[in-house]
């Protein structure tokens, strides 16, 4: 599995970090996890073949995780995109359908909107994706994702609650964890209790927290990906 960090920033774009979007490739098939802006520009500037994107998963309805999606939908024909888009709430599906209709004057025949359900909700024979509801949106759906492919497990927390009570005792080869809603010591000591080999810190706010994260004693291999970096597991 190849992981391309397209946007590793927190809730606002800031110095070389775009809002959250992560592309995972398994063979020649690509999956997009969150679509923060300007994901379409990032992929286009890199001359990435967007027709490889089979499915998009949106963890929750906050702008920093989905503001790049309209461009993908409205330019789907131009970039030869045909994909399913999984959203965390029905109201998000209605909003995107309505926005698409406003722009195209018709429904998109390029994308299909689907609703995420808790538990294993996606299995195309290449990857399996399970959703774990967390408390970030205080009762409204917001999901962390477990991705399984090629005998590897990746966990993406997406946004969590400040007390970290919604980070389950998962095991994973790689966990991508947000570091915006708690201090460095809290998040690293929590990660130390989990069976995870590598932990990539993303969505780090404020940016100065990177230094605090690096100063902690970690029982895992810590990663601090920048926008544009690729990892293989
Ligand atoms: Zn966020
Ligand atoms: Zn959020």
Image: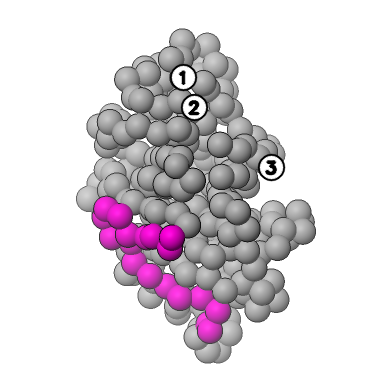
The image's mark for residue 198 is: 2
State the quadrant of the C terminus: top right
Residue at screen point 38% across, 60% down: 123
Q: Residues within 10 Å of mark 1 (few under 14, many from 20)?
A: some
Residue tagged 3: 228
Q: Is residue 166 left or right of residue 206?
A: left
Does residue 14 appear in this view? Answer: no
Q: Which residues are magenta?
A: 108-125
Residue tagged 1: 220
- Confirm if mark 3 falls within 8 A of ligand 1: no
Element assignment for label 2: strand
Q: With respect to residue 208, does 137 lie above or below?
A: below
Q: Are marks 2 and 3 in contact (CB under 8 Å)?
A: no
Q: Quadrant of residue 160?
A: top left
Q: Is residue 113 magenta?
A: yes
Q: Percent position (x, y) of residue 63?
A: 48, 55
Does residue 20 appear in this view? Answer: yes
Q: Percent position (x, y) of residue 91?
A: 33, 69
Farthest left residue in view: 139
Mark 1 → mark 2, Cα distance in angstroms:
6 Å
């Amino acid at each position: 599995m190849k992981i391309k960090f397209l946007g590793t920033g927190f809730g606002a774009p800031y110095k070389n970090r775009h809002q959250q979007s992560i592309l995972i490739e398994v063979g020649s098939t690509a999956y997009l996890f969150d679509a923060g802006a300007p994901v379409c520009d990032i992929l286009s500037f890199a001359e990435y073949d967007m027709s490889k994107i089979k499915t998009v998963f949106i963890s929750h309805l906050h702008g920093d995780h989905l503001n790049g999606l309209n461009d993908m939908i409205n330019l789907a024909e131009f970039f030869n995109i045909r994909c399913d888009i999984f959203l965390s709430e029905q109201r998000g599906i209605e909003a995107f359908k309505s926005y698409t209709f406003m722009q195209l004057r018709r429904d998109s025949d390029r994308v299909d909107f689907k609703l995420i359900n808790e538990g294993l909700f996606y299995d195309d024979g290449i990857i399996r994706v399970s959703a774990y509801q967390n408390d970030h949106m205080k009762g409204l759906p917001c999901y962390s994702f477990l991705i399984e492919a090629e005998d590897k497990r990746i966990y993406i927390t997406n946004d969590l609650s400040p007390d970290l009570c919604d980070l389950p005792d998962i095991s994973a080869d790689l966990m991508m964890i947000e570091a915006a809603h708690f201090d460095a010591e809290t998040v690293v000591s929590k990660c130390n209790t989990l069976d995870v080999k590598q932990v990539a810190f993303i969505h780090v706010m404020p940016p100065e927290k990177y230094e605090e994260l690096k100063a902690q004693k970690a029982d895992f291999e810590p990663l601090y990906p920048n926008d544009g970096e690729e990892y293989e597991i």
